[in-house]
Image (spheres, helix red, strand yellow):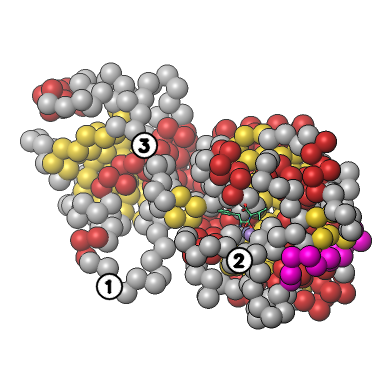
Amino acid sequence: MDIQFVTPDAALGEKSALAIVVFEGEAATAQGGAFAAALVGGRFTGAKGQTLDLIAPAGSAAARVLLVGAGKADGFDGLGAENAAASAYGTLKTSGLTTLRVQLAGDAAQAAKAAFGVRLAAYRFDQYRTKEAAEKKPSLTRAEIVTTDVDGAIQAFADLAALADAIAFARDLVSEPPNVLYPAEFAKRVKQLEELGLEVEILGEAEMAKLGMGSLLGVGQGSVRESQLAILKWNGAADKNAQPVAFIGKRVCFDTGGISIKPADNMEHMKTDMGGAAAVSGLMHVLAARKAKVNAVGILGLVENMPDGNAQRPGDVVTSMSGQTIEIINTDAEGRLVLADAVWYCQQRFKPKFMVDLATLTGAIIIALGDDVGGLFSNNDELAANLMAASEGEAEPLWRMPLPAHYDKNIDSVIADMKNTGGRAGGSITAAMFIQRFVNGVPWAHLDIAGTAWKKPSTIPTIPDGATGFGVRLLNRMVADKYEG
Ligand code: BES
Ligand code: MN
Ligand code: ZN
């Protein structure tokens, strides 16, 4: 998608659609009342989310005019601009027209946000389509965002374009099928991020065995694909030795459940059991691309959970890198086993300022919060507040969940230090508390994004059906607002 900022008087090219963003109650007076007559025949008021599609109205240079409701002028902000432009794109993407012009009243920053909205909405993963009908393919190839301050908008868009690239990178990593993106192949893809200036280390099974990562390695034991640990480093702070911030992601390239195998219905969805690592990869991508003034570490646990003659059994006891032993009750509760070693490794090696782990960890979080809201668990109020603030600013909603100390006994084992499941009740909480047993006093937060990593159908204009990239925006915002400089 070619994105340009143009001044209000720029001539419209052929095959252009003009999307006019109007505030609630102001549609009838927009463009000198040009649409007043058309409005009589419908219920368009300019409320948020509404659109009114007008084909070639008289006197219009555009082949099509789309009115996009932006809600009350009062609360209109960057997110409003982003969503309005994204829904204009969504409405017109297969219209047959090639250019979308978005006209909105607002400053350069809002114009940049509108461009960002179009970029996010235009994301598509179509690598594996070989014969899509022409009329189903998006026809829009160019977006023109109207602004009186072209230079200001270009400047404001630079960081947003980097963010959009990173979100697309994260979405791709989730969309790829599991036969293509197994652990070693995934490690190869993140290795390519070195081009942006990141340092990337990959550990294989032998190295992890030496480190004593019995918890992570047990998960991948039934897979013919080798488990990996990827370590991504960005040293952008003025003081190269400053304590880093750390992010840890679960990537189970495919989660069959292992010997505690999942039912066949919807099992294909478990190719997406990697939203956490995708988000961390996207975050590291954008930090490097915009040369963030921070030292940051990303750690990705890459495994495949398969049933096999060599697979881990329910009843097995494994020893984690921390030395704590774990009785496996259910081999399908594998994400926490991966995180246990990744989190421990992270704090031992990097002594981070804080750690945030992200994981598509439990079905229970979907029951609790649905698929629009992620679960936030934390041992630290300041870190939790920073995550909440960033989440609100970026429209990636989080809800803070409790960690009641007395639930911790639910994961006590009769024969080992702990067991890997705590029963159905409060399943997301006991999963978080399991990870917490591997946190050694460091400020820590856990985001359970099992619901938010994938959307179908999506109701959010900036998120096409499929992988969302959830987490990249909010983590990037939190780092930018609180931990840079
Ligand atoms: N990867 C799943 C969680 C999940 C479920 C992600 C639905 C995305 C959509 C996780 O590994 C899992 O299987 N969790 C089990 C835990 C249980 C066995 C304690 C679950 O939630 O059922
Ligand atoms: Mn599982
Ligand atoms: Zn899983």
| Residue, disc 2 | 261
Question: What amino acid is at disc 2?
Answer: Ile
Neighbourhood count class around disc 2 (C-alpha, 10 Å): few under 14, some 14–19, many 20 upward: some
Real-space Cα separation, disc 3 to disc 2, in angstroms: 44 Å
Real-space Cα separation, disc 3 to disc 1, in angstroms: 31 Å
Q: In this view, does 306 lie above or below 94?
A: below
User: Does label 3 or label 1 sit earlier along the sequence?
Assistant: 3
Look at the image and give the residue range highlighted in magenta. 312-324
Q: Position of residue 187 (x, y in %)?
A: 65, 71
- Of helix, strand and loop, which mostly describes the magenta segment? loop
Q: Is mark 2 on a helix, strand or loop?
A: loop
User: Does label 1 or label 2 sit earlier along the sequence?
Assistant: 1
| Residue, disc 1 | 131
- In the rendered structure, does residue 198 fall within the stretch colored magenta? no
| Image-based side of 452 in relation to 54, left or right | right
Whether tag 1 and tag 2 are in contact, CB under 8 A, the answer is: no
Q: Residue at x 60, y 73 (%)?
A: 182
Q: Is mark 3 within 8 Å of ligand 1?
A: no
Mark 3 vs mark 1: in front: 1
Q: In this view, does 386 lie above or below 130?
A: above
Question: What amino acid is at disc 3?
Answer: Ala
In-front residue for pair 252/202: 252
Q: Is residue 397 above or below residue 308?
A: above
Q: Can residue 226 be seen in this view?
A: no
Real-space Cα separation, disc 1 to disc 2, in angstroms: 35 Å
Question: What amino acid is at disc 1?
Answer: Lys
Q: Where is residue 406 in the image (x, y as percent from the top left)?
A: 83, 36
Q: Which mark is residue 84?
A: 3
In-front residue for pair 416/155: 416
| Viewport quadrant of the N terminus | bottom left
Neighbourhood count class around disc 3 (C-alpha, 10 Å): few under 14, some 14–19, many 20 upward: many
Q: Which residue is drawn at 65% across and 68% down?
A: 258
